[in-house]
Amino acid sequence: MSRRTVIAYWLIPTQPARSFFQGVINDLGRQYDAPLFEPHVTVHVGLNRAAVAESAISQAARFCKPIKLKALEIGHSSEFIETLFLQFALNTELRRLNEIIRDVAQDSSHYQLKPHSSLLYKKMPAAARRELAGSIKAPFSEVTFDALKAVRCISPTQSRADVEGWRAVTTKKLSR
């Protein structure tokens, strides 16, 4: 599979969810010797064009208010960047945000919007992931996201070095 540099567009949660997620990510990272990262939900992944990312984030921030997502369940998968995550329900506001970013970025990438906030990036056996997923409880049924961030990264992200190479391009608060 070919790897390339892309721009990932993230939604950043508000407090207290942000601190909760960061605490879980930090605890699991230390416990499992895994990379640490900022809590986020990926809205879109597109071409590596910083100027376009800047414009897409500015436009989206201007037209979107903070977004509330309904928390569903703690899930897990064999994919490195979805080892352990909190799944969210897809809603109209999130779909609209994704469309605005895709339109401004003039980007037809085939990114599939499946809103989740990862908690751990680590290759692990399915039984260990399942047990871990069952041991974590999110203390809220809904999470509000009020900022957008564009991050330059390698896709697909497959290792700690890839995660540690992520670089923010721009950040904006959702304003309306």
Image (spheres, rainbow, N blue to C red):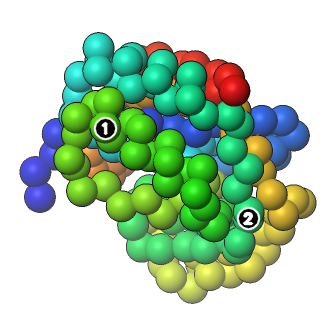
User: Cα distance, mark 2 to mark 1?
Assistant: 27 Å
> What percent of the width, then of the height, locates residue 7?
32, 32
Q: Is residue 170 left or right of residue 153?
A: right
Q: Does residue 173 lie above or below 78 as drawn?
A: above
Sequence-first disc among 2 and 1: 2
Q: Nearer the viewer, residue 72 or 176?
A: 176
Q: Residue type at mark 2: give it.
A: Ala
Q: Residue at x 56, y 29 (%)?
A: 63
Q: Secondary structure at mark 2?
A: strand
Q: Residue at x 63, y 67 (%)?
A: 89
Q: Secondary structure at mark 1?
A: helix
> What percent of the width, then of the height, locates residue 3?
16, 46
Q: Quadrant of residue 123?
A: bottom left
Name the mark on residue 103. Answer: 1
Q: Nearer the viewer, residue 6 or 61?
A: 61
Q: Quadrant of residue 154?
A: top left
Name the mark on residue 93. Answer: none
Q: Nearer the viewer, residue 88 or 78?
A: 88
User: Image quadrant for the C terminus?
Assistant: top right
Q: Quadrant of residue 5?
A: top left
Question: Is residue 161 among what the camera can see?
Answer: no
> What percent of the width, then of the height, locates residue 61?
56, 25
| Label 1 environment density (alpha carbons within 10 Å; few <14, some 14–19, many ≥20) | few
Q: Does residue 135 lie above or below 6 as drawn?
A: below
Question: Is residue 159 among what the camera can see?
Answer: yes
> What percent of the width, then of the height, locates residue 4?
17, 39
User: Image quadrant for the N terminus?
Assistant: bottom left
Q: Is residue 1 left or right of residue 89?
A: left
The residue labelled by disc 2 is: 71
Query: Disc 2 vs disc 1: which is toward the camera?
Result: 1
